[in-house]
Amino acid sequence: MTLAIIGMGSIGTRHARNALALGCEVIGYDPYTRNCLADVPYVETWPDAEAYVIATPASDHAASLARVGRKPVLIEKPLFGASPPSCFVSDHPLAMVGYNLRFHPHIGRAAVGPHASAQFWCHVDLAAWPGLSYGDTLSECSHEIDLALWMLGPGRVTDATCDGATWELRIGHDSGATSSISLGDHPQTHHRGGCLTVGAHRHWWTIPPTVDQTYIDEMACFLRSIQAGRMLQPACTLAEGLAVMAIIDQAREAAAR
């Protein structure tokens, strides 16, 4: 399979290495810089490929997705910077969003009900991340929002506050479950994890600074999904990625009141 990586920065290079290791023929294209791996051919114009990875800045995702059309695509998070462009159609059959923490071995879905609750926290130093530029904490640490929706089901923000680079969110889920999410950008800090409570049972997890295997498993799932003709669990579908963005919008609105 020929896989084109659109955006060969830190995350695009990571995806390229993983795809090569999994047997793909990889093409690199970056509209901003000619930064490519030695064993990845670089093209000067938009490549024709069987599948794509969009790893450009979020502000460029809409234009790239419009060019991909209905071909299989893995889009890095966050999906976009402001309101969703019209090309983000939730019924794309083979569009996957890069919420790789779903693939962490200590995290999984559980049968939940009205008495379930969960806490998620991510207090990290974004300056230590390998990329060159990032959005705010709410967008860049939205993995925790995705995990809340994935584990507890759809929901809406019931309360949100923002104090500098720190966000506190509460979500009421359609299942009756509740979740709280704490996100912060703090120098020389890495404190990331969560706790799911279902009845008398509590499940805790921590996430280390390096999660290389989750990216490998994510790419493997993407390739299996292409073969199957549908997104396979635990992949984040485009509709689920748009639900994360809706929570982000609701949090901003709630915090601004």
Image: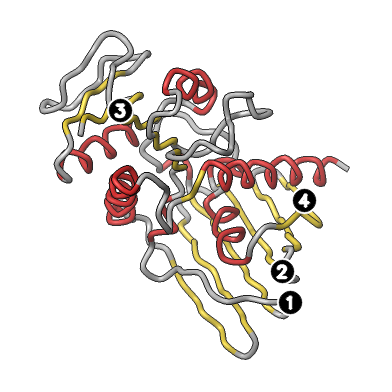
Q: Position of residue 7 (x, y in %)?
A: 35, 24
Q: Residue at label 2?
A: 175
Q: Mark 4 sits on what residue?
A: 161
Answer few, some or many: residues within 10 Å of disc 4's Cα (few below 14, many 20 plus, some between 14 and 19): some
Mark 4: amino acid? Thr
| Residue drawn where x is 49% and y is 61% of the image | 192
Say few, some or many: other residues with alpha carbon within 10 Å of mark 2 (under 14 / 14 to 19 / 20 or more): some
Judging from the image, what secondary structure is the residue with disc 3 in?
strand
Residue under pointer 3: 5
- Closer to us: 158 or 2: 2
Q: What is the spatial separation of the Cα atoms under label 3 and label 1, in whole angstroms? A: 42 Å
Q: Secondary structure at mark 4?
A: strand
Q: Which amino acid type is marked by label 2?
A: Ser
Residue ranking furthest to the front = 229
Q: Are marks 2 and 1 in contact (CB under 8 Å)?
A: yes
Sequence-first tag of 4 and 3: 3
Residue positioned most to the right = 257
